Image: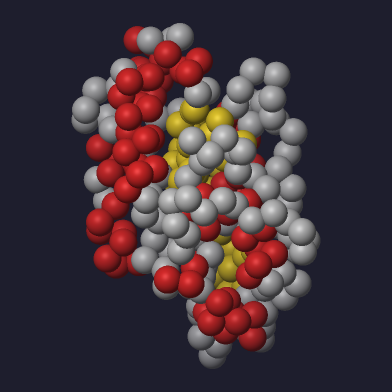
Amino acid sequence: MQKRFPSLSGYGVTWSANKRVAIVALVITALLIIAATTAWFTGRGEHSESTNAPSQESSSSPSEAAPKPAAGSGSVPKPPQISEPVAFAKAAAAMLWSYDTRDTDRDQQLAGMGAWMTKETKYADWASVSGQVPDPLLWSRMADQNQHATGTVTEGHYPGAFKQALAEAPSAITEAYIYVVTVNGRQQIEWKKGGGGAEERAVTLAVQCRPSHDCRLAGIAPSVTQ
């Protein structure tokens, strides 16, 4: 029986301190969300860091920018030309839950994911996205088993707290046009000799969708909010 290796999305996501403060400040000042609403941004940061943090090789510093896909992006799809936040978030979640170590190396995976990020570094939390990718050694072990996964999305929606904030201050979002979207779906994982399995997935994303521009990914929340 083949050993099952962890999936990409099983890795802990910890927003860097500076980015976490920036995002929380953005939500509080720009969207006027009550304190309880912002708890999901910070509530499980230390927990996920202590239990699931990737190795130092796979983590990114707050100032590190997303890599440019100079070496190609393998099986990672390009970001779609979508200007609607929920639709883009659904596509981004499917991308995050999908990978193929048979034809994509780790650098290509990171480069492909980086192409989805907003270029506005003030709002881009690359560490939360790159933290989804295993360290080089584990990626190599996954490749030895031809491990690959396909993500499918069942639905996406704005969390209730975010909708409440927009209702209370509809013009506040025009500062950064950051939308909070929760996506639910499923990830099918397979490896050689017929091994495989499936898991339910859920993720809360920060998506930037400025008017007359395609949406881009800003970051991944450390916990899911419905």
* Among the 4 quarters of the image, the one containing residue 167: top left
In the image, 104: left or right of 65? right
Residue 186 in picture, x, y percent from top left? 54, 54
Q: Is residue 201 visible?
A: no
| Quadrant of the frame with the N terminus | bottom right
For the residue pair 183 and 64, the one nearer the viewer reads as 64
What residue is shown at x 49% (from left), y 28% (from top)?
Answer: 179
Which residue: 43% across, 51% down?
A: 62
With respect to residue 143, does 225 lie above or below? above
What color scheme is it? secondary structure
- Please state, as top left, top right, bottom left or bottom right, where the C terminus lies in the image: top left
Image side of residue 93 versus residue 182, left or right: right
Estimate the x, y position of residue 181 in percent, counting from the top left: 48, 34
Location of residue 118 with respect to 187 vertically, above or below: above
* Residue at 56% from the left image edge and 30% from the top image edge: 208
The x, y position of residue 225, in whole percent, is 36, 39
Q: Position of residue 11 (x, y in %)?
A: 43, 64
Q: Residue furthest left?
A: 36
